[in-house]
Amino acid sequence: MEFSVLITVYKREKPENLRKSLLSSYNQTIKPKEIVLVCDGELTEELDKEIESLEVSIPILSVYRLPYNLGSGPTSRFGVKKCRTELIARIDSDDYCLDTRFEKQLKAFESNPNLIMVGSNILEKNTEFTVLKKVPETTSEIRKYSKMRNPFNNPSSMMKKDYILKAGNYRKVRYLEDYDLVMRLLHDNPTKDFFNIQEPLVVMQTNDSTYLRRGGLLYIKTDFCLQLDFYRRGDINLFQFIRNVFLRNVIRILPNQVRKWIYKRKMREKV
């Protein structure tokens, strides 16, 4: 089965992170047909030089440059349309894959043709700690978990392109565009299967800004609107809507260091 890797990059990314992410996607036990890199607006001179170097090192790398910064959702939407294969694997520009990631995900698709999305657990790693972020395994567990939180780690996901497009592709839902897409895929495909491999296949490199982005009034507003969308569509009931708005957003108003502690101690597993 042929597949593409889709990565988006913004000017605040570190060149060394982007290099590690792209090379980890290329140096796999099963290589992708193409790696699609979409630059979300103007980048720094250092990033541009790094990309030029990577185009030589990675012959399957295709680079697209958007003239303005559009945000993750619209940039991902553009990238999906540029991918030429049946399957699309996502990875963030500051994360990297373990070298058997794609081999194991393709094996899952081959063993169950009814699957439309396969993800995995991930490791969150920084200079202070490494923790495991687990997600539910089976279709029924994924559907149940989705009513409270995103049941997929977006940087680990591999999806069928046709179903992404049928669901409406990525939308402009700041910070939560991946959760938004997953819920539409679940809603639109009640007879299809979803699966998470129960081992970490991606390493997410975190720092204090990672947890800072998960808080604030803009995040709360976006999350409220998304939960309201889920409720209106029938994905969650009224009780679940009220519970989610309260529990999911209490953590958003806490100081960053407190939020970091909660994610580390209460929402992740130590490794």
Image (cartoon, grey):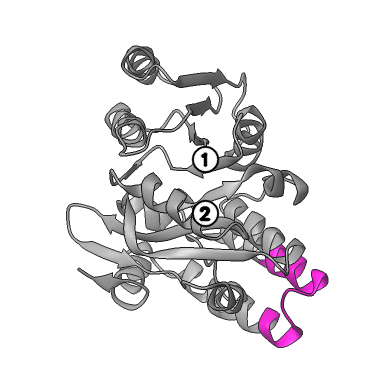
Residue at 47% across / 73% down in the picture? 136
> What residue is drawn where x is 30% and y is 39%?
29
Marker disc for residue 109: 2
Q: Nearer the viewer, residue 165 or 46?
A: 165
Residue 201 rendering spot, x and y as whole percentages: 33, 54
Looking at the image, which residue is at 73% across and 69% down? 190
Residue 171 in view of the camera? no
Identity, as a three-letter code, of the amino acid under mark 1: Met
The residue closer to the viewer here, 36 or 252, is 36
Residue 145 counted in the magenta span: no
Q: Position of residue 246 (x, y in %)?
A: 59, 80
Q: Secondary structure at mark 2?
A: helix
Element marked by disc 1: loop
| Disc 2 to disc 1: CB gap under 8 Å | yes
Q: Quadrant of residue 262?
A: bottom left
Position above or below: 69 against 170: above
Between 132 and 35, the residue placed more toward the observer is 35
Task: Answer above or below: position of 267 versus 58.
Answer: below
Q: In this rendering, does residue 203 appear at all? A: yes
Left or right of 158 on screen, residue 218: right
Neighbours of disc 2 within 10 Å: few (<14), some (14-19), many (20+): many
* Residues at marks 2 and 1, CA–CA distance in whole angstroms: 9 Å
N-terminal of the two: label 2 or label 1? 1
- Read off the residue under disc 1: 1
Q: Is residue 196 above or below residue 8?
A: below
**Magenta segment includes 236:** yes
At 35% from the left and 13% from the top, the residue drawn is 49
Q: Which residues are magenta?
A: 224-241
